[in-house]
Amino acid sequence: MKAKNNTKVIYITIFISLIFSIIPLPIALDAYRPNWALLVLCYWSMALPNRVSVLTAWFVGLLLDVLLGSVLGINAFALAMVVYVMANNYQAIRNFSLWQQSLIIGLLTALYHLLIFWVQRFVFGVDFSMTYLIPVITSAILWWVIFLLLRKIRRQFKVR
């Protein structure tokens, strides 16, 4: 018997990551908010690169721009670039241990934040602050949880 391709599971996890991205947090904790959508997209583009690609990241980024009220296209551009890097190197990244993947996710999250800063610097003239990079640490730490949780979901629902 052939297993179904449960595309809905992928979209549900992306939707939940978007909800986590806009849930209000206390001001003291908001600087530590991990990049939920980025983490989920990185997982799916590594696990199923033929199903979640740059185009998916672009649309999720546009949704994130609308939800966060940022300039339209900033998150779309940054997410698409990160998923492009992930999709081109998914075979190597899959073979790394979980802590090595966590370091790579940290680097990709840093790339994401630096791309957003670069565009904001160009458009608004904002100055760089090290607080832009705090989510890099929390995202790298939470990669373990996201990876193990989404892998369990993928296997349980037989997403292929």
Image: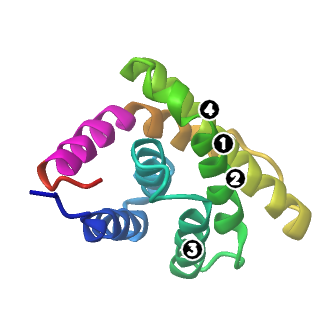
In front: mark 4 or mark 2? 2
Q: Position of residue 141 (x, y in %)?
A: 39, 31
Q: Residue at x 53, y 36 (%)?
A: 90
For mark 4, what is the residue? 107
Residues in magenta? 142-155
Is residue 62 in sight in this rendering? yes
Q: Residue at x 65, y 58 (%)?
A: 80
Q: What is the chief secondary structure element of the magenta stretch?
A: helix
Residue type at mark 2: give it. Answer: Met
The reply, left or right, for residue 151 in relation to residue 23 is left
At numbered mark 4, what does the secondary structure look like: helix, strand or loop? Answer: helix
Q: Position of residue 89 (x, y in %)?
A: 60, 34
For mark 3, what is the residue? 59
- Up the image or down, 137 lies above or below 16; here it is above
**Dot 4, how many residues are within 10 Å of its Cα: few (below 14), some (14-19), or many (20+)?**
some
Quarter of the N terminus within the rendering: bottom left
For mark 2, what is the residue? 81
For mark 1, what is the residue? 85
At numbered mark 2, what does the secondary structure look like: helix, strand or loop? Answer: helix
**Dot 3, how many residues are within 10 Å of its Cα: few (below 14), some (14-19), or many (20+)?**
some
**Tag 3 near tag 1, CB within 8 Å:** no
- The answer to which of marks 4 and 1 sits earlier in the sequence is 1
Cα–Cα gap, marks 4 and 2: 13 Å
Q: Position of residue 95 (x, y in %)?
A: 44, 21
Q: Position of residue 146 (x, y in %)?
A: 31, 43
